[in-house]
Amino acid sequence: MSVRRPPVWLVPNLLSLDAPLVAVAWLYIFAKTWRVMYHPWPVYLALALVVWGIYAADRLLDAALHGDDEKLPLRHQMHRRLRKVLMVLVPAALLGALGIALFLLPREIFSYAVIVGVLVLGFFATALFSGGRREVPYVKNLLAGLAFAYGTALGAHVYMPANDVFDLVSSPEMLSFGILCMLNITAVDLWEHARRSHDPEVRASDELALTLPLAVLGVIALLYTAFFERGILLRPFYISILVSTGALMVVNRVRHRLSTDSLRVIADLCLLAPWIYFVVA
């Protein structure tokens, strides 16, 4: 059978290129937010390689766990189709990132990497144990969001004077971005879950499971910006969080008019939109 060529706007998502783009954009935001004076380009390249490698490996794993299920999302079908090439490129990307870290980045980055390594291992362990379940994987998404946020932020935090791993772990900026990432991933899962169900109670529960945390995160970002001294000094960052939160809520209201593939791309754009505001601000 002939395979229909996907539209150009969907290709970055199908090839796992969207996540590295989001990571690099938010690394820039973290670096500027924390007033990092020296921030070389290899840290951006290493982050992009690591994020792409992990995301591509996760989709290869999902495709393997589901076997020949034709109901697999198109991105998983693409990774299964290209698995021989990806089985070479993924290790190469991860080894390339390791080489950059060894020779071009500060040695302290390895002490930071221990925590993100634990989060990533927990993420893949959760993916293996969840198998082919069709429910929303909240624990897996939480680990993914925290790993993504911590791994992105450490690329800026390691260049701060008197940096400390535990300062990053307790950083309000990193945690708020981690929650935003978790909600971004969960939003797509909830939209797909609601579409598969014909039970109005299930759909209402999925709606509440997304809108309530988004509203809480938006209110916290707004209050932090208005009333806390640290938030006032870092106002562009928290407004960026607020922009992404608001964008996701808008997409949630109009999701019925969009295809699942479109929703995935737009959800990523909701995380990229604040970068434009941040640069201007």
Image: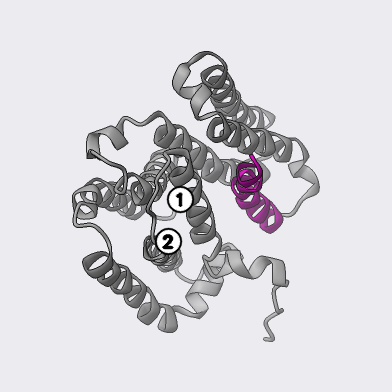
The image quarter in which residue 95 lies: bottom left
Q: Quadrant of the N terminus?
A: bottom right
User: Overall secondary structure of the magenta stretch?
Assistant: helix
Task: Categorize mark 1 by other alpha carbons within 10 Å: few (<14), some (14-19), many (20+).
Answer: many
The residue sitting at 59% across, 21% down in the picture is 222
Residue designated by label 1: 27
C-alpha gap between disc 1 and disc 2: 8 Å
The image quarter in which residue 213 lies: top right
The residue sitting at 50% across, 26% down in the picture is 233
Q: Quadrant of the C terminus?
A: top right
Q: Position of residue 34 (x, y in %)?
A: 42, 39
Which disc number belongs to residue 273? none
Disc 2 residue type? Tyr
Q: In the drawing, does residue 240 fall left or right of residue 61? A: right
Q: Position of residue 47 (x, y in %)?
A: 39, 60
Q: Which residues are magenta?
A: 260-281
Q: In the drawing, does residue 63 fall left or right of residue 278? A: left
Report if residue 263 lies within the magenta region.
yes
Residue designated by label 2: 44
Q: Position of residue 57 (x, y in %)?
A: 39, 66
Q: Are marks 1 and 2 in contact (CB under 8 Å)?
A: yes
Residue 89 versus residue 2: which sits nearer the camera?
89
Q: Is residue 48 above or below residue 222?
A: below
Residue 150 versus residue 236: which sits nearer the camera?
236
